[in-house]
Amino acid sequence: MDEISQLEDIQQELKAIGEKLGNLFLNDHPNFDDVFEDMGEAGYYIEEAGYRLKATIKTLQGKGETEQE
């Protein structure tokens, strides 16, 4: 498996993790207010990691990210 395929697999795993986290503490969960900020931040960083992986994949494919993207 090449690097691009491995990065794409990691990107998919991060997406699945983000979805699982989103389903753990729905707004009717008794601890929702206690974990809302931290879970939101965790979701943000997981999503950002996915974007960075996408940029890395584009770079490796010779389609490097530009300032306008």
Image (spheres, helix red, strand yellow):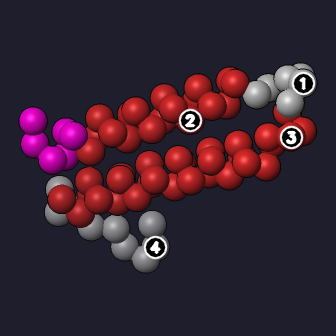
On the image, the x and y values in percent for residue 29 come to 85, 23
Residue 4 within the segment the image draws in magenta: yes
Q: Nearer the viewer, mark 3 or mark 4?
A: 3
Cα distance in 3D space between marks 1 and 4: 43 Å
Assign a secondary structure to mark 3.
helix
Cα distance in 3D space between marks 2 and 3: 19 Å
Residue 30 is labelled as 1
Residue 68 is labelled as 4
Residue type beneath disc 1: Pro
Residue type beneath disc 4: Gln
Q: Which residue is mark 2?
A: 18
Residue 39 within the segment the image draws in magenta: no
On the image, the x and y values in percent for residue 4 come to 19, 46
The reply to whether dot 1 and dot 3 touch (C-beta < 8 Å) is no
Of residue 40 and residue 57, the one placed in the foreground of this image is 40
Q: Which residues are magenta?
A: 1-6
Few, some or many C-alpha atoms within 10 Å of disc 2 (few <14, some 14-19, many ≥20)?
some
Few, some or many C-alpha atoms within 10 Å of disc 1 (few <14, some 14-19, many ≥20)?
few
Q: Residue at x 33, y 39 (%)?
A: 10
Q: From the viewer's perspective, is residue 29 above or below residue 41?
A: above
